[in-house]
Image (cartoon, grey):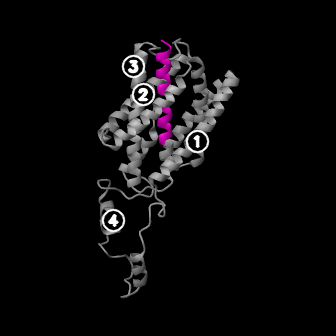
Amino acid sequence: MASNPVFNRFNEDLSKGRVSGTQPQYGQFSSPEQQQQARYGGPGGYPGFQQGYPQQPGQGMPDLEKAYEAPSATATQSGRMTLDDVVTKTLGLFGILLVFGAVGWFVGKENQSAGMALWLGGMIVGLVLGFVISFKRVISVPLILLYAVCEGLFVGAASGFFNRVYPGVVAEAVLATLCVFAGMFAGWKFGIIRVTERSRKIFGLMVMGYFLFALVNVALVWTGVLDNPFGVGGNGPLGIIISVIAVGLASYSLAVDFDSIQRGVEARLPEKYSWLMAHGLLVTVVWLYIELLRLFARIQSR
């Protein structure tokens, strides 16, 4: 849950002009041939000239006049990704997550063993699917939908368990997640929180380090090396500091996601990329919610 490689891969591809359906942006041409082709309209060509035989004077003029008189196609009509596409698909994925989250919650309430199976199974399968979706060159909508299902079962079962052990902690985590989401969006939108290439690199290294730490922490708890369910730091000051750092990373990840979505819209990506953007945003929000859930549980258990 600690890493969101979806936007990392997208931003790398976009900066190098490898995203399908887009033209390289300024500074993205990797060879003189690409620069010449972009400037003159074709390999070895010149501005305003087409390869092949010249047309006779007047030929094709009616079609040209119609093209000039016709209204410009909108992003939706041209099959390009819009902000509305991302919002619609994000809401759809969250709807799926909430429905199956309710399933995980009630199954765990009736049968704790079944709930634990959904918790672990949803977490592991979701993690595997997340990496497959992130590194798969072809965007697979069925895999994205399946990921939302698995994350729903995982989040629902885990939330039910936490709420039984630490009453009220789920409501606190949900409210805090909504507030952080709104606050980070406002901060990014008004330029208070900035996302630069340098901050992306630093953030990526920090997330990678935390992700490796989280894997080691889970392994130590599962193998019985650490008897505290929270792992390193437990519910003491160190554990709370670790959770605060994790919440901070997940919060800034939202700003990175917002910035990446804006870049994608401005680059006029194909409409199918809205699914990938929605998936990436879902990954970050679930990560933020889980970290807040752990933070409030640690505080309540002291």
Q: Residue furthest right?
A: 110
Amino acid type for the residue under numbered disc 3 = Ile
Q: Which residue is mark 3?
A: 241
Q: Which residue is mark 4?
A: 37
Q: Alpha-carbon distance for marks 3 and 2?
A: 10 Å
Question: Is 129 displayed left or right of 2 in the figure?
Answer: right
For the point 54% across and 41% down, the residue is 132
Q: Which residue is mark 2?
A: 247
Q: Alpha-carbon distance for marks 4 and 1?
A: 45 Å
Q: Secondary structure at mark 4?
A: helix
For the point 40% across and 33% down, the residue is 251
In the image, residue 37 above or below residue 218: below
Q: Secondary structure at mark 3?
A: helix
- Which secondary structure dominates the residues rendered in magenta? helix
Label 4 Cα neighbours within 10 Å, binned few <14 / some 14-19 / many ≥20: some
Whether residue 202 is visible, yes or no, is yes
Amino acid type for the residue under numbered disc 1 = Gly
Whether residue 231 is visible, yes or no, is no
Q: Residue 15 in the image: x percent, y percent?
A: 35, 49
Q: Which residues are magenta?
A: 280-302
Q: Alpha-carbon distance for marks 2 and 1?
A: 24 Å
